[in-house]
Every structure is written in C-alpha cells, then in structure tokens.
Image (tube, helix red, strand yellow):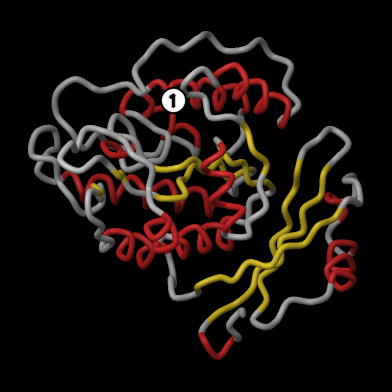
Amino acid sequence: MPRGPDNNSAFIIWVSMRSSTGNVYLLPQCKPKMPPSLVQAEDAVASRPKKWCHIDAHLSVRRFEMDTTIKNTNDFIEKLSNLRFEAVFNPYRDRCGEFDNADAPAIRRANLRLVIEAAQTKGVASLWIARDLGYRGGRRTGLALTDELHLEAHSELYGSLPLARATHGPALAERTATVIWDVLSVVGQPIFLWNVFPLHPHEQGDAMSNRCHTRAERHACRPFLAWLLQTLRPRSVIAIGRDAQSALSELDIISQQVRHPSYGGQTEFVSGMYHHYGLSSPVPRQASLPF
C-alpha cells in the first residue's frame, strides 16, 4: 500500500500521451496526498498551457511513490556517494588504484553536479535511462553512457561545462557511448543520461567486467531516479534496452523502449531514436569500438 504524507512521501502522477508522430510525452504532477482519479488527472492535463494541446488524447496514468528524503543536488550526490554494495564500484566514493588520479572520486562528483545543475537551469527534453555504468565509461567519468572520448561532447550538451578526466593514461572509448553520442549529436536537444543502477556492478574478483545489477541494488537506488524525475520533469522517458524498460516498469514508471545498441542492436537503436525525435538524417556510421 502507498504511504501517505505523514511518512514523508509524495506521489507523482505520470500522464503519458502519444502524439500523431509517435512521440510520448510525460506530464509529471507531484502531489503530497493520494493521487486524483483518472477524470481529475485528465482535467489537469486539459488545463495545461497551450503548448501541450497538439497531442492526442490517448491517456494512461501511473502512480509512482516518491521518496522525498533527497533535498537538493548536494544531498543527492552525498547520498549517492555513500552507497555500498558487494562487487560494486562506486565512482563517487571509490578510487581505482590502477587508473584513477588521487582525487578521482571528487572529480566525478563535480562532473555529476555540474551536469545536474545545468540540466535544472536549461531544462530537459528527455531522460534516457540505461541499465548500469560500464567499466570503460561511467566508472571512469562519473557520467552515464559517457566515456572519456565524449566528455567534451557532454560538456557542450549544456553549454561548455568544465568537465574533467578523473583518470591518467590513454583515454578509453566505449562502443555503447560512441553510438549514444552519435545520436545525441543529431538530436540536438538537452537530454539527461542516467542508469537504473547508477554505479558499476562487476563480477566478483574482476573489477574490469560488467554484470547486471540485482533487484535489491536497483531498489536501493530508486530514490535517486525519483528525485531526478521530479526535479528535471522531462517530457519523455526513454528506456535503453529491455533490462532498463523492465526495471522502470517494475518501479511503475512509464517509458518508451528502444533496443540497446550493444550486441547487434545498433541499427535498431538508431532507428528507434530517429523515429522518436522525427529525424530523417542518415544513420550514423557503424561503431567498431569495445563495449
């Protein structure tokens, strides 16, 4: 049963509407009490500013219970940094003795803070959510779906942010990040990137490997995703891959799924993203970098 406001909880009413072009728009409404009925939710949408009036009236409402214990961006990053799990590298707290600079966790925290604050200021068109951080990408940069070769591109996404490398030696590329940023360069909209599990889970005894997070790990990170959804209020949420979509559905969050670009899914991923944003540009070049 959902908790009431006495338990420091609130509810987000997600009204999902699909346009004639296939785009999905989410209208989040945070309520400090039980959500209104479907009729009340539809009335709330009808009273929205005129910019929403072009979308079709295909409505579905989901209730998402939100943990409101995260107060602001600094609190978000502090709580994220304090997370500990077995066989998980927390890039905002942990330091890799082989590749990281001495102040690597602080650099990654600063990178994430800069991106969140810029997204709050500029606004976000969509939230792209994948599964978890990879050892060649977010583990090193502190930014979801972003390897070191695309740090500069990420900084330009919100206007020349001073993002910094946290590692020494050659910059590493990640194939998934390469495909993601090929598409982002064409979309040309402010997109916020995140993961259902925002840390790097790895196989026991092999820090430079990737594994899928567990259900317990995912649920422990639910408040961070909830805070981002409430704070950034994206017009759409896109799940990258089946694992991400299933996890979001389990958390009762409406999303549109596209195939993950790894393991032969690049063409379908690009096609799905181009369709979502109404793009007719040529498909980006085939990536040939490691995952």
Q: Residue at x 65, y 28 (%)?
A: 273
Q: Secondary structure at mark 1?
A: helix
> What's the residue type where badge 1 is placed?
Thr
Horizontal and vertical percent for residue 202?
A: 26, 41
Q: How many marks?
A: 1
Dot 1 surroundings within 10 Å: few (below 14), some, or many (20 or more)?
Answer: many
Rendering coords of residue 277 (x, y %) = 71, 30
Instruction: Work out whether residue 180 or residue 244 is closer to the camera in this orientation and state it.
Output: 244
Side of 131 where 277 appears, left or right:
right
Q: Residue furthest bottom?
A: 6
The image shows residue 232, relative to residue 289, as above or below, that is below
Q: Which residue is mark 1?
A: 176
Q: Quadrant of the C terminus?
A: top left
Foreground pick, 279 / 266: 266
27 lies above or below 195: below
Quadrant assignment for the N terminus: bottom right
Q: Position of residue 266 (x, y in %)?
A: 54, 19
Quarter location, residue 127: top right
Q: Position of residue 249 (x, y in %)?
A: 62, 53
Depth check, front residue: 269 or 263: 263
Residue drawn at x 53%, y 44% is 244
Q: Is residue 198 above or below residue 27?
A: above
The residue drawn where x is 46% and y is 65% is 223
Q: Residue at x 46, y 42 (%)?
A: 131
Q: Quick check: 246 above or below 35?
A: above
* In the image: residue 54, left or right of residue 131: right
**Residue 113 shown left or right of residue 127 in the figure:** left
Image quadrant where residue 276 sits: top right
Name the residue nearer the viewer: 171 or 117: 171
